[in-house]
Amino acid sequence: MSVRPLLEHRAAVRTAVRACFEGRGFVEVDTPVLSREIIPEPYIEPVSLTDGLGTRYLQTSPEALMKRLLAQSSGPIYQFSHCFRAEERSPRHDTEFIMLEWYQPGASLENTAELVSDLLRHTLGTTGLDRISCRDAFGQYADVDPLTATADELLTAATEAGLVPPEGTAALPATERRSLAFDLLLSEVVSPRLGLDRPVMLEAWPATEAAFGRLDPRDPSQARRFEVFSKGVELANGWEEEPSAIILRERLLATNQLRQSQGRRVLPLPERLLNAHGETMPAGVGAALGFDRLVMLASNAQSIDAVRGFNSDTA
């Protein structure tokens, strides 16, 4: 069977994405996949290389380097980036994959919802975008309020849904148990029910799950973070950016504490990225979208392997 139709379809989706962004004044950029810095994340393990030049990391996301461009007045930018994550292999994950990432200075979640709706209309043929809060989604599908529930209440909701928390969860500090339970409910209970009719933007996340997003000034218990789902598949993740290097450093230190409690290696802080968060770093929105998943949905396929020429097993 010829691989040509698959390649043409991927190219057509990529062309539609480019038209969407360039029509809004974005510039396509390229950043290195190999860097001396990596952004520590709780549940993502980077691939590292050590040679005569020291230790460097294959990037799990182009975030750090794209933000350094933002601090140099790049304006709105996007890219299709090869990303790498160890220990990830499933119908929707692989060690190497393509991430569509973008940053828009001055944007809000409202602007981003319009962009995402237009992007999915041109690539998936969908119409509109529903917006729902974490509180409403978790209340409807998991019968728990993720903003006010304790760690034990979230874990109880998980067990009542038939989920089994990882071994050793009970011994973790409350903050870490809470994040683990939230992620478990989101991935196994809430996410599969989102976007079944048309795409959904899940917003107003608990402040404890802000990542690099800023807290809502009207309600600091919520973060201006979002995820986008279509047909129960998580497509995109992003937030209104937190500009303070001090706050980001605190969050990264907490992430390393969580990694250490899970038996994962503690990663060095991305000092160049933190140093870029000064007066020249603009406020706005950053987002990342799984391009292979987008093509998978556009092709009505069941796995990302079905819409790629190679995967980590065949490359």
Image (cartoon, rainbow, N blue to C red):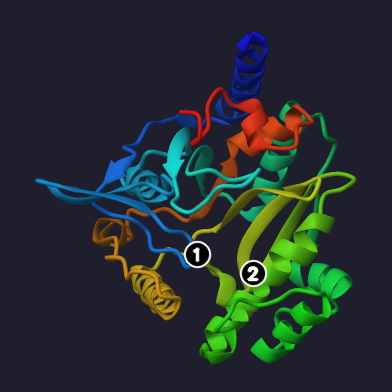
State the residue position of label 1.
Answer: 43
Under tag 1, what secondary structure? loop
- Left or right for 301, reference 256: right
- Left or right for 39, reference 98: left
- In 3D space, how far apart are the residues under numbered discs 1 and 2 (Cα atoms)? 10 Å
Under tag 2, what secondary structure? helix
Query: Residue 5 placed where, x, y %?
Result: 67, 12
Circle 1 Cα neighbour tier, 10 Å, few/some/many (<14 / 14–19 / ≥20)? few
Question: Which residue: 81% across, 45% down?
Answer: 231
- The answer to which image quadrant residue 239 occupies is bottom right
Q: Which amino acid, by three-letter code, is at mark 2? A: Asp
The answer to whether one can see residue 278 in this image is no
- Tell whether label 2 touches label 1 (CB within 8 Å): yes
Question: Which residue: 41% across, 44% down?
Answer: 62
Q: Is residue 313 above or below residue 46?
A: above
State the residue position of label 2.
Answer: 183
The disc, 1 or 2, on the residue closer to the chain's N-terminal end is 1
Q: Which amino acid, by three-letter code, is at mark 1? A: Tyr
Q: Is residue 173 above or below residue 128?
A: below
Query: Residue 116 placed where, x, y %?
Result: 69, 41
Question: Which residue: 73% across, 59% down?
Answer: 202
